[in-house]
Amino acid sequence: MKTTTCALALSLGLAVASNAALSLTNGDFSSDTSNWNSEFGTSPDGWFSSLASTNTNGNYGEAMTGGGGSNNNFTYGTGRVAALKQVSGNYYQQTIGLVGEQTGVQVDFLGGYRAHSSYSTAARNISIEVSLWDATLNVELASTTIDYAYLAAGNALAAESKVLTYTSANGANDLALRFTNVSANPSGANPNTALIDGVSITAVPEPSSAALLGLGGLALILRRRK
C-alpha cells in the first residue's frame, strides 16, 4: 500500500510538473549581443521584432539612465527597456513552450509609455496588448489589453499581472508570447511609443491537473496517518 501510494503521488507530481514546462529568456531586455539599442534591423536577444528589418519606425531598446533630454524624461531607474513604436501590427514575440502543455499562462511585466515633449498629452495615451499565439499556425489563442493614460507627474512603469487562458487542439505546436502596441494614434507614429520591461511567465495548471495534485497530496496525508 505504501509503495502504491508513493508511486501515485510521484506520478501526479510529474504530470503537473510537465504541465509547467515554460521558458522565457531575456525578460528584462538587458542582454544585448546584437546592438539592439539601434532601432534599425535588430531585435533584443531571445525576442523577435516584427519591425526589425523595416529600417524605419522600428522597435528598439531604450536605455534607462534616470534622466535625459526633454524627450527622455525617465524617472524609474537604470537598465534597458523594450520600446514599441505605434506602427500598425508591430510587436515583440518569443516562443515559450508547447501549446498543449498548459491551458493558462500568468504574464507579469512592467508597462507604460515613452515621454515625448513634442506632442500633446492626448497623443501620449498607450494601449499594450498581451497575447498568446500558436506560433506554428500564427493564430491568436488569448489576449488582454492594458490602457495607460498620460500622467504629467511622471512616467514610471506600472506593474502588471495578467492570466491568459486558452484552448487548443494543436498540442505539438509552439506557444508564443506577444506584446503589441495597439494605441489609437492621432498624431503619427512617434508619440505613442509603448515601453515594456521585467517580463516573466508562470504556467497555470489546467483544472484537471490541479485536481490531480490535490489527490496526490491527500494520498500522502493518508499514508502518513497510517
Image (tube, rainbow, N blue to C red):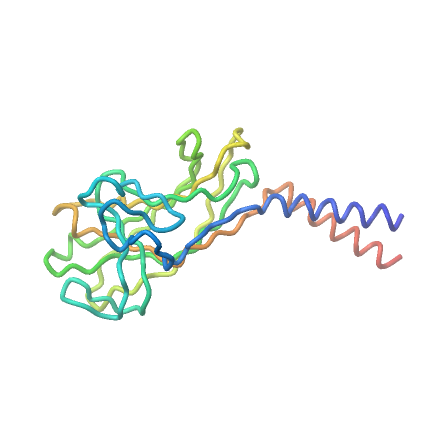
Between 42 and 134, the one nearer to me in the picture: 42
In the rendered structure, the answer to whether residue 207 lies left or right of residue 150 reads right
Query: Residue at horizontal 25%, vertical 44%?
Result: 41
Instruction: Provide residue 63's location: percent of width, then percent of height.
Output: 27, 62
Between 102 and 40, the one nearer to me in the picture: 40
Query: Residue at horizontal 21%, vertical 44%?
Result: 184
Instruction: Provide residue 146's location: percent of width, then percent of height.
Output: 33, 50
Instruction: Provide residue 28's location: percent of width, then percent of height.
Output: 39, 58
In the rendered structure, the answer to whether residue 185 lies left or right of residue 63 reads left
Report how many numbered discs are placed on residues in the image: 0
Query: Residue at horizontal 53%, vertical 29%?
Result: 169
Q: Quadrant of the C terminus?
A: bottom right
Above or below residue 80? Residue 48 is above
Q: Using the rendered view, name the quadrant where residue 48 is placed.
A: top left
Instruction: Provide residue 7's location: percent of width, then percent of height.
Output: 80, 46
Above or below residue 176? Residue 65 is below
In the rendered structure, the answer to whether residue 139 lies left or right of residue 155 reads right
